[in-house]
Amino acid sequence: MTPRPRPAARLGAGLTVGVVALPLAMAFAIASGVPPQAGLFTAIVAGFLISALGGSNVQIGGPAGAFIVVVYAIVERHGLANLMISTLLAGGLLFLMGWLRLGVLVRYVPVAIVIGFTNGIAVLIALSQLKDALGLRIERMPADFFSQIGLLARHLDGLNPAALGLALVTLAVVVLWPKSYAMPAGRLPAGARLRRIAAHVPGTLVALAGATVAGVMLQLPVETIGSRFGGIPQALPAFALPEFSWTAAKQLLGPTLTIALLGAIESLLCARVADNLADVPRHDPNQELMAQGIANIASPLFGGLPATGTIARTVTNVRAGARTPVAGIVHAATLLAVVLVAAPLAEHVPLPALAGILLFVAWNMGEWRAFARLRRFSLTYRTVLLGTFALTVVFDLTVAVEAGLLLACVFFVYRMGTLFRAEPVDTPQAAVSEGGTAAGAGVQVFALYGALFFGAVAKVEAVAEQRRAGTHTVVLDLGRLMLIDATGLDALEQLQRQLQRAGVRLIVCEVHEQPQRLFARSRSRPAATRRPGRSARPAPPGRASVGPGRAARPRRAAARRTRRHSAGA
């Protein structure tokens, strides 16, 4: 039985995650092209709802790095008001997916696609932060990859050394600051104990506070939250309904699907990670999707952004000792208290420091070792991963995932087609013999292996060409055929008609349950249809057929130990 966590542990975990989320929420919002308070309001509203209603005990929700590129592109192309509408519609779609119990379908997304678009998003996040990290005076960054590179290259002569130095120092502090999850347990030397104590304070907060103090004390010529956005309002998020129209909604189908798909994948992947880290009940994917839907419906009503489960904050929550949703609720309350008490201080936060933090986030979220391990995997895996990665970077996430799924399906069909075989058997077996006696030289047996579906029918069509001269009966042994679809059944009917024109009988035997059911549903149930483990004797001509027609009733004989069913052309 899992020990019940102490209230102090729950509160401590919530406070810790709230402190971690503070700089990240502002950074994600600014990188998405919206004011920093939008990220804070998302972490407060959506974070509370995801923890209170979600299917995972320890998952922390809020604005996520994976959404930066998506949100920026939507704001750039459709405007902030339409982003709110897309988020509302995506929330409804997520809730519907959970209500229809479709959460398990997210697990069918191949890992190559997930790694590909995750690494692509990481590259785009890093690229988007170069403007602030270098201190370049660019009014608005385009959403297109090549346009961003060209614009950055044209403005490199305006590099700000103070901004670059501040970004690099911030990045170094975040990278080198001790991490709580990397601290060993047990007794440690004095120096290691100090590192473990320091690890309880998030490195992002230390770096951001240090950069803010340095910027104010040294009067560094860098942009701040106050200079760009005018600070953060010291008030509760205001409720407001976005202006809705069906004309705009129809144009937002692509962005809506992107937000819903990415939110579902990220939240359920995060929940699975949390299940493996904490001794808590496994998450309910459908309940989690419904909670994500409610959170994404509520978030834009309070000026927030799309939200999902966040792996970094969830891992921090687990490492801090959280085992119940209380910690996630405390995390949202902590952020609300910070907004109400300390919002005016945020106007001095330098934007290059936030850029340095996001460069670390981009590096940390990418699975870069997957590129080094590509040579160990098949060509299909490499093609799907690299194709999804390239399309995410060059085009957008929706195109990348659609193309990745299409490639994965094509390769799967090809692979399953290559696994199917129709091989001639030299000696007729018991399936066409009486008491083990061979049925004669004019009988040729073909054994079918695998799955007979639309991607493998060409191999069945070749059976007629492989029959020997003088053959009067062809037997298809389906004992190792596990699955057949309608196209495969049609191929058998075509083969039967082709052999019939040549005066050759077709017998089908050793039929498993799934093909048997398909024969029955399609009224193509041959008398040869029987379950494995029994022998089969050819029925007289005209009594049964692979094609449509009434199935012949099998003869019953009490003296026989098995029944024999066959299909004659």
Image (spheres, rainbow, N blue to C red):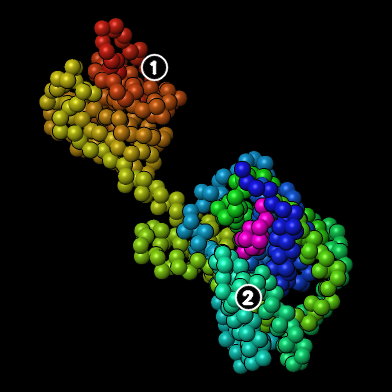
Question: Please, what is the three-letter code of the amino acid marked with disc 1?
Answer: Arg
Q: Which residue is mark 1?
A: 550
Q: Which residues are magenta?
A: 312-323
Q: Position of residue 512 (x, y in %)?
A: 36, 28
Q: Position of residue 515 (x, y in %)?
A: 39, 29
Q: Is residue 429 left or right of residue 25?
A: left
**Residue 63's image quarter?**
bottom right
Question: Please, what is the three-letter code of the amino acid marked with disc 2?
Answer: Leu
Q: Is residue 440 left or right of residue 95?
A: left
Residue found 75% across the figure and 80% down from its top: 349
State which quarter of the image contains the C terminus. Answer: top left
Q: Is residue 284 left or right of residue 343?
A: left
Q: Which mark is residue 194?
A: 2
Closer mark to the observer between disc 1 and disc 2: 2
Residue 319 within the magenta-colored segment of the rendering? yes
Q: Nearer the viewer, residue 18 or 323?
A: 323
- Crowd rating for badge 1 (residues with CA inside 10 Å; few <14, some 14–19, many 20+): some
Q: Position of residue 69 (x, y in %)?
A: 63, 68
Residue 49 within the magenta-colored segment of the rendering? no
